[in-house]
Image (cartoon, rainbow, N blue to C red):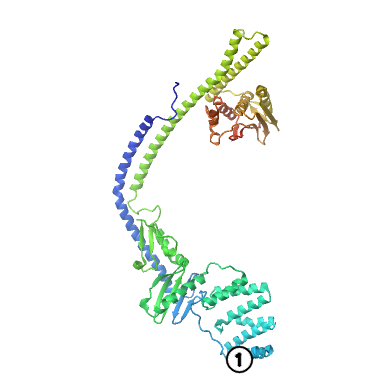
Amino acid sequence: MRNRLPTRPSGRLIALLLAITVVPLVSLVWLGWKLLEEDRNEIIARESRALTTAADAVTSALDRAIAIDDQRAAGGADKWEPGAVVVTFTGSRLDAVPRRLAYYPVMPKLPETAADAFDAVDRAEFQLREPKTQIDLLERLVTSADPVLSATAKYHLFRVLESQGQHDRAFRLSEPLLEADRIGVATTPIALATRFKRCQALELRKLVAALQQEAEALHRDLTSGRWTLDASTYELYLGDARRWLKLDPKEPTVEERLAGAAAVLWRDRSPQIGRTASLPQRQTVSVGSDVFTVLWQPRPGSARALIATADYARTHWLARAVEAGRGAHVEVTVPALSSTSIPPDARTEIRTADATNLPWDFAVTRAPGAVATDGRSRRPFLLGGLAILMVMALTASYFIARAVHREIAVARMQSDFVAAVSHEFRTPLTTLRQFTDMLREGGATDEERRQLCYDAQSRATTRLTNLVESVLDFGRMEAGKRPYRFESVSCSEVVEPVVSDFQREIQTAGYRIEYHADESADIDADPEALGRALRNLLENAVKYSPDQRTVEVAVTRQPSSVSIAVTDRGIGVHASEKKAIFDQFHRGTEARTRGIAGTGIGLAMVDHIVRAHRGSVQVESEPGKGSTFTIVLPVRA
């Protein structure tokens, strides 16, 4: 049995490499661990103290930020950023500053006219059915010195005029009523009732553009909290405004969310108003998925509260705490103001609302990458030195193992090359021996048969010569001693003779070459070397196309280059091997599997020759569908 060269490092070599690298590394790790262990407890203690100090700073920053707004609310400030409102509970009344609530738990009693003030008007409308009499009566009431009676008469006159078709007069009459927020009609602000009636009138008249404008004003006034409405009245009018504007229900506005929070406080806390000790000073209130922060200021007979959304709290209060934490290299987490939970980490300190007198629990966590503020230089240097030593040892081991593996791989490829060359030599030698024996023994008696023997011997000798020249030429190329004789020549003048000669050689085997030359160009080339490279590509195209017997050769001119493409429809090349096929002694997996003969130096020679011509070789291939090898050469300047 023939001895084979090893294809991978032996177990003994691997064990030796491991012994050289692992033992020192383990010793280094053990010594480093001992040194680091001495510092670990002290570092933990320092971090704990630093975290406590940072938590105290964050607590102070939060308390100061909240106290500022608390004092503003106590001082009666009337300007607040969106997301905050000050509500005052007094008996059965609730006021808001600014008027930012979309609706209120209770509606205030607005001034209205006496019930019998419009008896004559109602009689003219419902009993006598005399619109003119009704209009005359209302016009006299409009001139009343009582502003409530006058505004109410204008509202009814607007309604009657509209029903009688006097649209322009009706709308002019109603204009002043749009500002009458403090007068009521049927418990509703007369400005709201008027705006609503105007929308209804425009809808009946099918005045789309005017209705759009009027409905937008109604929607804007409703959602901005202009009027003190209860929730049912607000939703009733808002539903019609959305219908006229063709608006789908959206996420609640800030005004609606604040109104919901005020309603919850009214329901839960109104019994405690006036009892100062029973109200918490700072608390949170949940309404659905929203969390509101409430700052109470109880007082005899009433209570005032600043209601803030989570966005407001994050922007105006938490932002200052985060800034304070950033200076201490910590992160602040308030679960009540975000969806983030407190991390269960030893590097986290939790402060509860009961302990801090703040509205929420919060956590302070050491920021990623932050370390203790003192005595830290030793640990990074130890870890860095240990890491450098480990990297150096592992890198050296890797390169040693890689070199050994490559040497073994080269030895294996050289062994395969010797075997392949031996096989290639054996075929023509066998042919020479057979026909020589035939001639020596007189097997070829007539002249024609002797000529056939001579031709066969000539072909075998030529093949042996080409094989020897290829091996010798490749050796000179590898050593950098292969001389090239460059001259100016047309690319087609190099390609056409090679294609013609090769066509004659393969036509008896049933192969055919289709040659196309769109446009040639002059190049600096060694015709003999470039021809050999092209011939190698043609031989490969035929060799690896056992079933499809057509090979295409195309010469194409580009602006600054000319390409020679050889296309077959053979077995193709796997994508993973497209670079490796140009390595010396490499033979593709498919070629070895199918038992296709070859030396593994053909494409390496092509690559050498083309690079010597300042060109490149490109490969396009798909397994089972063939390959295209393209030589790209620069055009002579």
Picture quarter containing residue 160? Answer: bottom right
Q: Which residue is mark 1?
A: 119
Vertical order, 564 against 464 (above or below): below
Q: Secondary structure at mark 1?
A: helix
Residue name at image x 31 percent, y 50 percent = 40
Q: Dot 1 surroundings within 10 Å: few (below 14), some, or many (20 or more)?
A: few
Image position of 112 (left or right of 274):
right
Vertical order, 25 against 480 (above or below): below
Vertical order, 517 against 35 (above or below): above
Front in this rendered view, residue 387 or 209 = 209
Asked if one can make out residue 274 in the rendered structure from this viewpoint, the answer is: yes
Picture quarter containing residue 277? Answer: bottom left
Counting the numbered discs, the total is 1
Residue name at image x 58 percent, y 90 percent = 146
* Amino acid type, residue under disc 1 in the picture: Asp
Q: Quadrant of the N terminus?
A: top left
Front in this rendered view, residue 285 or 220 = 285
Asked if one can make out residue 139 in the rendered structure from this viewpoint, the answer is: no
Image position of 21 (left or right of 207):
left
